[in-house]
């Protein structure tokens, strides 16, 4: 029988430990397993398109509100959207000689109305492309359609007419060279280049809306930029169809419109006056083809839509005659802004003024025969001017958005948003139109016995008190007095007020040369 020898227990344990150590050492020495061939390398991170991408934390919000504007952005921050809108509700009332005597339905009674309802979507693609697309109710200008015979042509959303607001695409090549194509505020005057939600007056003033640039928006192409620093020297030059937002181009005669403005003291200091004192020049040159253009010359209306001067009349045969733009259309003038610090108060007195000379050729045609026969050729020329004073007795002291500056929306998400500017604004304005319309002055035209040939003189005095919460909320009340010297005497002044529309028993025009308008507005914008 074989002899069995038993190993000691300690030797067995030592052997087990040695085996485990050798296995672990072999595993550490073995090369790492190779990934199978055929898989593509891990792609590099996307390029940095916005400065806010550098050092971006996963917790950074992709949606929110910054400087009063909602925003959405893609995870790579190469695409941004800015939803927006503007909603204005007005209370309107008029008083003065003849107001209570005009026919019912004249809009001179107190009433509430939605002035404007706009929805808008802006955005950015990288750092070089921007766009905006807006639709609105109530985008018409005051006085539009006045040649149809009515003296009351207010603009409000209740008409149910949806039309484009600003619709544009921009390419920002350099700070000194950018391009915009689409429907934009025409680059003419400080007032017209101020966005609607940021204008001091509820409506554009008499001189700008009635004479200098009646159609606020135009369709065309714009090149613009800023030299030597922000706003130090800025230019905006464009080619436009010339028909305004409500009419597509019907002829091939474009309008050349341009504006140049400068803040020459901006590089020299940080005071309010040095940073914002501004001077500028605007000009416009274009034409209208008499064989193709059949829309009316722009009426002159108040801020609530009463038509002070109407581009229509009845000739000696009782036929309705319309005044149409025809031939050369020219305008030139300048702007001035002087924001002055009031010593010891921390407050600012903001002074603005503009004046423009306009010379537009016209023609007259019997209603219904606009494209087949012209009665005579004339011209409308004159000067429109205004001066405005703004003071903030409480709050930040300057508007949240700079007057006269319209740029694509851009938010700097790298910096904390500054507090929204809130405050109470008091303002006063004086404006006027000193013009002349003569219906038969060109191309050997013969005047009818009723053809107008006289001055058009209208003045506006007014003011407003309003509370601002940034540009997001506005609530205020405004007053305007319109003065028409020698109203009711067509050989002296062609403009009229309600008191001129009501004749006495003998058929003589009514008395009175003034119209008072009171407007309350609540507006929400974002």
Image: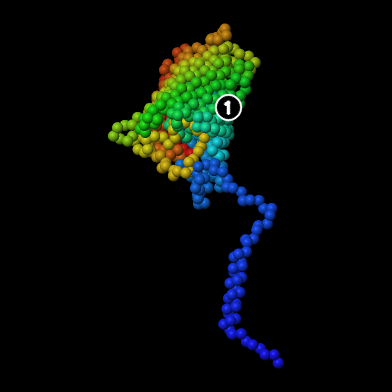
Q: How is the image coloured?
A: rainbow
Q: Which x, y percent locates residue 165?
A: 55, 33
In the rendered view, does 100 fall on the left or right side of 24? left
- Observer-nearest residue: 121 or 231? 231
- Observer-nearest residue: 168 or 180? 180
In the picture of the structure, the residue carrying the numbered disc 1 is 220
- Observer-nearest residue: 171 or 458? 171
Taking the view exactly as shown, the residue that stands out farthest to the right is 1
10 Å crowding of disc 1: few (<14), some (14-19), many (20+): many
- Observer-nearest residue: 427 or 67? 67
Q: Which x, y percent locates residue 498?
A: 46, 23
Task: Tell me: residue 194, above or below residue 254.
Answer: below
- Visible residue check, residue 98: no
User: Could you say which quadrant of the image residue 270 lies in?
Assistant: top left
Taking the view exactly as shown, the residue that stands out farthest to the left is 344
- Visible residue check, residue 421: yes
Q: How many marks?
A: 1
Q: Which x, y percent locates residue 59?
A: 50, 52
């Amino acid at each position: 029988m074989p002899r069995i020898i038993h190993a000691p227990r300690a030797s067995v344990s030592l052997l087990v430990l040695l085996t485990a150590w050798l296995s672990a050492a072999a595993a550490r020495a073995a090369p790492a397993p190779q990934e199978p061939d055929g898989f593509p390398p891990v792609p590099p991170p996307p390029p940095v398109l916005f400065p806010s991408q550098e050092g971006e934390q996963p917790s950074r919000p992709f949606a929110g509100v910054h400087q009063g504007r909602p925003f959405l952005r893609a995870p790579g921050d190469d695409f941004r959207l800015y939803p927006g809108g503007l909603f204005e509700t007005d209370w309107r009332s008029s008083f003065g000689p003849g107001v209570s005597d005009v026919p019912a339905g004249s809009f001179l009674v107190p009433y509430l109305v939605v002035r404007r309802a706009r929805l808008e979507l802006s955005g950015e693609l990288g750092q070089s492309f921007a766009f905006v697309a807006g639709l609105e109710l109530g985008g018409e200008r005051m006085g539009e359609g006045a040649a149809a015979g009515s003296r009351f042509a207010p603009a409000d959303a209740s008409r149910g007419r949806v039309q484009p607001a600003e619709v544009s695409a921009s390419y920002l090549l350099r700070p000194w060279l950018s391009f915009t194509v689409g429907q934009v505020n025409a680059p003419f005057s400080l007032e017209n280049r101020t966005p609607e939600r940021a204008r001091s007056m509820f409506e554009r003033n008499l001189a700008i809306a009635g004479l200098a640039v009646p159609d606020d928006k135009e369709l065309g192409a714009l090149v613009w930029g800023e030299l030597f620093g922000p706003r130090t020297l800025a230019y905006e030059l464009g080619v436009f169809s010339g028909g305004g937002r409500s009419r597509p181009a019907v002829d091939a005669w474009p309008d050349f419109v341009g504006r140049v403005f400068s803040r020459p003291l901006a590089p020299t200091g940080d005071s309010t006056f040095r940073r914002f004192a501004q001077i500028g020049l605007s000009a416009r040159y274009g034409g209208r083809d008499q064989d193709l253009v059949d829309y009316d010359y722009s009426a002159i209306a108040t801020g609530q839509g009463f038509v002070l001067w109407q581009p229509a009349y009845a000739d000696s045969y009782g036929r309705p005659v319309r005044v149409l733009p025809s031939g050369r259309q020219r305008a030139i003038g300048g702007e001035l802004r002087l924001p002055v610090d009031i010593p010891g108060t921390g407050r600012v007195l903001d002074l603005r003024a503009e004046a423009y000379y306009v010379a537009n050729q016209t023609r007259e045609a019997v209603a219904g025969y606009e494209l087949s026969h012209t009665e005579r050729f004339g011209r409308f020329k004159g000067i429109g001017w205004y001066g405005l004073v703004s003071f903030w007795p409480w709050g930040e002291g300057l508007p949240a958005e700079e007057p006269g500056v319209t740029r694509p929306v851009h938010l700097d998400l790298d910096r904390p948003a500054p507090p929204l500017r809130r405050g109470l604004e008091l303002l006063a304005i004086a404006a006027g139109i000193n013009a002349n319309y003569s219906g038969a002055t060109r191309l050997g035209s013969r005047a009818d016995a009723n053809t107008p040939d006289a001055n058009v003189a209208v003045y506006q005095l007014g003011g407003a008190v309003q509370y601002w919460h940034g540009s997001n909320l506005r609530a205020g009340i405004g007053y305007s007095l319109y003065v028409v010297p020698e109203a009711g005497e067509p050989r002296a002044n062609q403009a009229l007020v309600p008191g001129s529309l009501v004749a006495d028993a003998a058929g003589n025009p009514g008395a009175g040369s003034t119209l008072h308008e009171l407007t309350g507005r609540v507006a929400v914008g974002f």
